[in-house]
Amino acid sequence: MDQLREVISDITEGLAIELELLLNQPVELSEFSLGEDQPGDGFILRAANGDFHFHVKTYLVDEKHEVNLLYIDELMPSPRQQAMQYATVHAGILSAIHIFKVVQENIVVDRRAVDPFEVESAALFVFDDDSHWLLYPGAADSAKTEIATDTDFILDTINEMGLVSSRMLTLLERA
């Protein structure tokens, strides 16, 4: 019998509802920067009814255990946002957003084992043109959020990271 574990998430129910409003709408998935010498981390999902910043932050626990947490922030109009420069990665009608979690096990802090817990760590954007874009934590030495569209690479990454579905935002959930 599976043990219930705490899921660590940055996604509130209110934010999930805001993200659902992007479904079946034209959106742009974009990289961004704050200027030539200030690259941004993560990606922006831009739509007529709101912009959302997706990025994965890596935490080092007890100097040896990596824990990756997916953050999603709704961007409010501000001088900083107006100064952002965008490079569109993909544009189309958004069909679904899948949020993935990973089980964190075998973490020892101060010689005490920490109970296994789950962390939402990645997102998959599905477009109506059948393209898929996985946003996931980059290599430990880069600490940069990565994105991939190659199906084989996405499947390999999901497998290697041990990602499992945490929640799916689709039009079916609204019915």
Image (spheres, grey):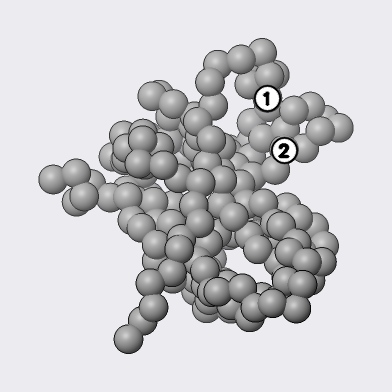
In the figure, residue 86 lies in which quadrant? top right
Number of other residues with Cα within 10 Å of mark 1, as a class: few under 14, some 14 to 19, many 20 or more: some
Residue 103 relative to residue 107: left or right: left
Whether pointer 2 and pointer 1 mark residues with C-beta atoms closer than 8 Å, the reply is: yes
Front position in the image: 157 or 100: 100
Residue at x 68% of width, y 27% of height? 85
Residue on which the image places disc 2 = 40
In the rendered image, residue 145, in percent from the top left (x then y), is placed at: 66, 52
Location of residue 39 in the rendering, given as x and y in whole percent from the top left corner: 77, 37
Residue at x 32%, y 50% (from the top left corner): 169
The image quadrant of residue 22 is top left
Identify the residue at horizontal 36%, vertical 58% (top origin).
Answer: 167
Would residue 149 be visible to someone looking at this image?
no
CA distance for labels 2 and 1: 9 Å
Name the amino acid type tagged 2: Gly
Q: Label 1 sits on what residue type?
A: Met
- Front residue of 99 and 90: 99
Residue at the spot of label 1: 84
